[in-house]
Image: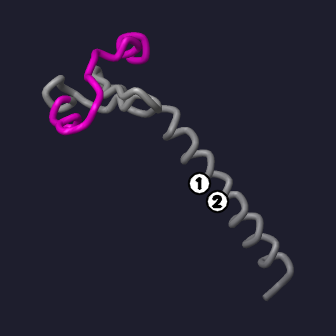
Amino acid sequence: MSKFLMKFLIVGATFGAAMAAEMAVTGAAHAESYPFCLKRDVGAGDCRYVTYQQCLAALSGRAGYCQMDTYYGQRRQ
């Protein structure tokens, strides 16, 4: 293989890896927001429920409560 082709492949692979990393980070920044949260005494709230009933079903048998996500409207804008 020529030196030019080797350099081209290395630069291409590096660029591809950088683009993949950027897309992964950007995708996380645009996470979906849901209106209901499951809250417990310890840890962060679990805000991934579309309906209050879904939240209650996930809570079933465990200590905690469900509530409307106070930041839901602000994140959607």
Quadrant for residue 51, please give it. Answer: top left
Q: What stretch is highlighted in magenta?
A: 56-76
Amino acid type, residue under disc 2 in the picture: Gly
Instruction: Residue 16: give its label.
Output: 2
Residue 46 coordinates in the image, percent (x, y): 36, 32
> In the picture shown, does residue 5 fall above or below 20?
below
Residue 60 is left or right of residue 39, and the answer is: left
Name the residue: 19% across, 39% down.
61
Task: Tell how many labels.
Answer: 2
Q: The C terminus lies in which quarter of the figure? A: top left
Amino acid type, residue under disc 1 in the picture: Ala
- Seen from this angle, which residue lies furthest right? 3
- Tell me if label 2 and label 1 are in contact, CB under 8 Å: yes
Instruction: Residue 32: give its label.
Output: none
Pointer 1 residue: 20
Residue 59 within the magenta-colored segment of the rendering: yes
Residue 19 within the magenta-colored segment of the rendering: no
Residue 59 coordinates in the image, percent (x, y): 22, 34
> In the picture shown, does residue 16 fall above or below 76?
below
> In the picture shown, does residue 63 fall above or below 68?
below
Question: Mark 1 packing: few (<14 Cα in 10 Å), some, or many (20+)?
Answer: few
